[in-house]
Amino acid sequence: MTAGIDMGKGVGGERSHLDLEELLATRLLVQGNSGSGKSHLLRRLLEQSAGWVQQVIIDPEGDFVTLADRYGHVVIEGERSEAELLGIAARVRQHRVSCVLSLEGLDAEEQMRAAAIFLNGLFDADRDFWYPVLVVVDEAQLFAPAASGEVVDEVRRLSLGAMTNLMCRGRKRGLAGVIATQRLAKLAKNVAAEASNFLMGRTFLDIDMARAADLLGLDRRQAEMFRDLPRGSFVALGPALSRRPLKVEIGTVETSARSGSPKLLPLPEANVDAADLILTPDPAEFARPMQRYVQPAPRPATDILAELSKPRTEQTEPQETRPRRTEMTAGERQDHISEALADVLHGHDSAFRTDAELYQDFLVRCRIRRLSGATVALPEFRQRLAVIRSGADAEMQGSELWQKALTLSHAVTDDLKSVFLMLATSALSGNPCPSDALIARSYGTHSVRRARRLLGYFEEQGLVVIHQDRAGHRIAAFPDLGVETAPGNPDAADVEVRSAAE
């Protein structure tokens, strides 16, 4: 069965249709400057397909929450914890409920983090719930920026990774990405390149017109046409739309955004008392305290020179009466740093917080302990976190094999070192191989599927060899270290494994 969605009028007044089944397999990119009609196009697509397929909308401005009144979309506020967003995303896929993730009111970094966590939750859903979902991301350049901006790099990588998973690997999990952006130049190329269908609207900048023309297979002279497109008109191309570039005028919609485009309104009739209305204060204004800035009188130059010429030995109070800060020895300083690290990791949710958040918490605790100057840089902080999370004791950390394991850990990225060192610690101490739940916790996620993918990645890099005993328990062998873990149950619960280790 083919579901044809009426998008509007094409050339000659004929109706232009979008093949929904083809769209689910090939994805869609919408581009156009502000005011070109992108939101109108997305609303038309969502309204026409609401009865055919489940929909998830990532809405940074809260424009699409009005779909809830007519089509029953559930509005999800983005100001939630990571665990809440992951749980909601899993239930959205399980129960096939259309929803709008409203990120209105959050700053850019919080929007990127919430959208990334929610998309990862959709992506990591159990295989039994891989039903087709139309995932619409408005203002996609905010979540997949081509260059780093004011947000921290870790949040940018998290958001960009989630968008890449949606557009590159989401099809096999039933996720069909529809992304809209104001400027192609600001959108990451690896995200935009995965779309096979395009709707290009009005564009004025040369760099954006050139990229739009390249995606549509047009030459540079034909790219000028994007400047002449009226509002609400787009050039369509792709297997779900048209085999050749086709101009489409988007049809009407039944719902509207809470915030519309500015409209001209007639001015009020001239008032003869307009000057009195403006210049006569409201009595309520006198009840409010008024802050006035008083320009300080400039100090005479002779006073400033006299103050600068005073000898430094002149003090307002005796030196011996001032409290002196005792100097710390190098050993005491390291003890305080270790205590601050332990306090940071003591929290129950520390495993699921980002390294950037933990690092900021660590710096605050260092200031509380009056550790002045540079303490630990972020790369060294991550290395120490990985060592602490591995569970290796002081005796093991002093061994030659442990130093070799640290060297091997440099072959993986910083976020994987804690998992690798935890496996190495289990092998060096002869403990059972950690379960999927414990590996996922060490990585900072609840997804056991991702834990198994990490083990597969280590095998691909030639760092470990995973095999099983006759009972089906998992063993991780380290060829470079000449050791392996004891057999461990991969399906054991996180709490059971930690209590057994303790």
Image (tube, helix red, strand yellow):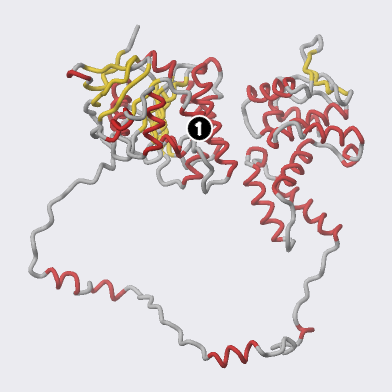
From what the image shows, is residue 212 above or below residue 132? Answer: below
From what the image shows, is residue 481 above or below residue 19? Answer: below
Q: How many marks on residues?
A: 1
Horizontal side of residue 284 vs 380, given as left or right: left
Quadrant where the C terminus lies? top right
Q: Residue drawn at (67%, 49%), measured in percent from left and top?
A: 359
| Residue 247 figure quarter | top left
Q: Mark 1 points at which residue?
A: 118
Mark 1: few/some/many CA within 10 Å (<14, 14-19, 20+): many
- Secondary structure under badge 1? helix
Residue 264 appears in view:
yes
From what the image shows, is residue 181 above or below residue 249? Answer: below
Q: Residue drawn at (16%, 70%), measured in percent from left and top?
A: 277
- Is 281 or 181 nearer to us in this picture? 181
Position of residue 223 measured from the top left corner of the image (x, y, whole percent) = 33, 30
Q: Residue drawn at (17%, 19%), measured in percent from left and top?
A: 13
Check disc 1 and give the amino acid type: Phe
Residue closest to the far front: 221
Quadrant where the N terminus lies? top left
From what the image shows, is residue 52 above or below residue 500? Answer: above
- Is 297 or 244 nearer to us in this picture? 244
| Residue 393 figure quarter | top right
Position of residue 138 measured from the top left corner of the image (x, y, whole percent) = 39, 34
Position of residue 131 measured from the top left corner of the image (x, y, whole percent) = 46, 16
